Each structure stands twice: as structure tokens, then as C-alpha cells.
Amino acid sequence: MRRVVRLALLLLLSSAPGRAAVPDAAPFDAVLEARARNGGFDYAGAAGQDKKRLAAYLANLGDAQPSGMTPDEKKAFYINAYNAIAIQTLLDNPGKGIRDISGAFTSSRWRVGGEKVSLDDIENRLREMKDARIHFAIVCASRSCPPLAPRAYTAATIGEELERQGRAFVNDPSRNIVDRARGRLALSKIFHWSRKEFERDGGTLLKFVSRFAADASTASYIATFPKDPEFLDYDWSPNQP
């Protein structure tokens, strides 16, 4: 009888409201508000309070239950998890770029959604959602990455936020070059690495990129560019502003 009662209690607790909710992003928001600047993160300036807040948020990520989230909640959850872990990785390794940290993407494991995952695992979960715009939002703590948003992503506005990130990324001349005078189109290496996803969502890579151009004339130029674009070298140095 006692075993039956205990089992019933466990089932009740596991289905209790809030267990599957997206973790409170307030600690991460506070860190981003203090240290996210000009599309990068001020690792050098991060203080004890920032690190405590980030640690609290990472702990919340571990206890979350993605299986109970809506698709948009899950998308925001994993993007935030990726960005928070990438930031923590550099804070744990002062002065190093993320590519200089052994296993940063593959073998370093973090507790997210009740399981141990790597940064690559998180990116693959996002890829499964079949929305190429996620590549405008996940930031691998490097200069050639998309700009780091100054707030955590939320399910309520995730579509708007990804569109905004896409425009900021595509129209940044340090990450993508549209030189009409010289007939040159040079895109971020991200568009090369994940090309099939962009083609899936846009028909062609250039049609997808053109959606985020600053104006109609530039969009038309990109969409009808007569040859394959160049892809720029990727700068893996820390995105310290």
C-alpha cells in the first residue's frame, strides 16, 4: 500500500504545474543587460554578481523539462541555453577563444533539460525544429558570430526576434559584404556551413539571404546575383566589445 501511495505522489509531482515551464530568464536578462554590448559580451568586465546570476540560470536550465514545452518555448529555451553556455565557457577560460578550448563544442557537457549535452547537441536540437533563422541567434562567443541579443529570447516574440537578428546579421558589413560597385557578394561562413538549411527555407541560399536585406533594391541584387557568393574567413577570437 505504501508503495502505491509513493508512486501516486511521484506521478502527481511530475505532472504538477510549473515543472515543465521554461526556466525564469531574469538572471540571464540581468547578465545580458550588464555585459552585452555592441553585439558582443564584456567577459573582462564580468563581476562576481554577473557570474552568480549566470550560474543560477544555468542551474535552472538543468531542471527544465523541454518535453512539456510548446515548440516556440523550446526554441527560445535552447537558444538561450546555447548562448549562456558559450558565455560561461569563455568566463571559465579567460583570454582564450572558444576554438582554443578543448572539447568546447563536443565533449564539454552541461545539464540542460534534465540531460547532459554539449553545445553541438543543443545546436542539433535546434536544427531539428527546421527554422534556419536559429543560426542568426546562437552565438558561439566569437567575433564572426551573429550579434548577441541584449535580452534572453522568449516564446511570445521568438519570430520577431529571429527576424530582427537576421536583419542585423545580414546587413552588418563586417559579417556580410554587398559591394554592388565591384560586383562582389561575400557572405558569412555560416551560410556555407548550414547552406542546406537556408536553401530548404528559402528555395535558394541567395533568396533566403535577400529576405533580410535593408531595402528592396539590395534584396533584388542579392536574390539575382549571377554566381555563387564568396564566403568570408571566420574570426574565432572572443566577441569582447
Image: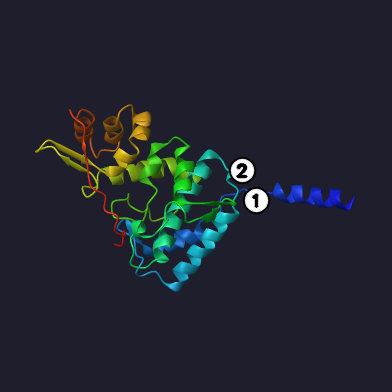
Q: At 39% from the left edge and 66% from the top edge, which residue is drawn? A: 93
Colouring style: rainbow
Residue 37: image x %, image y %? 32, 60
Residue 63: image x %, image y %? 60, 55
Under mark 2, the amino acid is Gly
The secondary structure type at the circle numbered 2 is helix
Q: Which corner quadrant of the image does residue 200 belong to?
A: top left
Q: Nearer the viewer, residue 131 or 211?
A: 131
Q: Nearer the viewer, residue 234 or 161?
A: 234
**Are dots 2 and 1 in contact, CB under 8 Å?**
yes
Q: At 45% from the left edge and 59% from the top edge, which residue is drawn? A: 29
Q: Which corner quadrant of the image does residue 24 belong to?
A: bottom right
Give me the disc on residue 68: 2
The secondary structure type at the circle numbered 1 is loop
**Which is nearer the N-term, disc 2 or disc 1?**
1
Crowding near pointer 1: few (<14 within 10 Å), some, many (20+)? some
Q: At 9% from the left edge and 38% from the top edge, which residue is drawn? A: 182
Examine the rendered structure and indicate whether residue 142 appears above or below residue 187. below
> Which residue is outermost to the bottom?
48
Q: Which residue is mark 1?
A: 19
Under mark 1, the amino acid is Arg
Quadrant including the C terminus: bottom left
How far apart, in angstroms, are the residues tagged by discs 2 and 1? 8 Å
Q: Is residue 64 visible?
A: yes
Residue 97: image x %, image y %? 33, 60
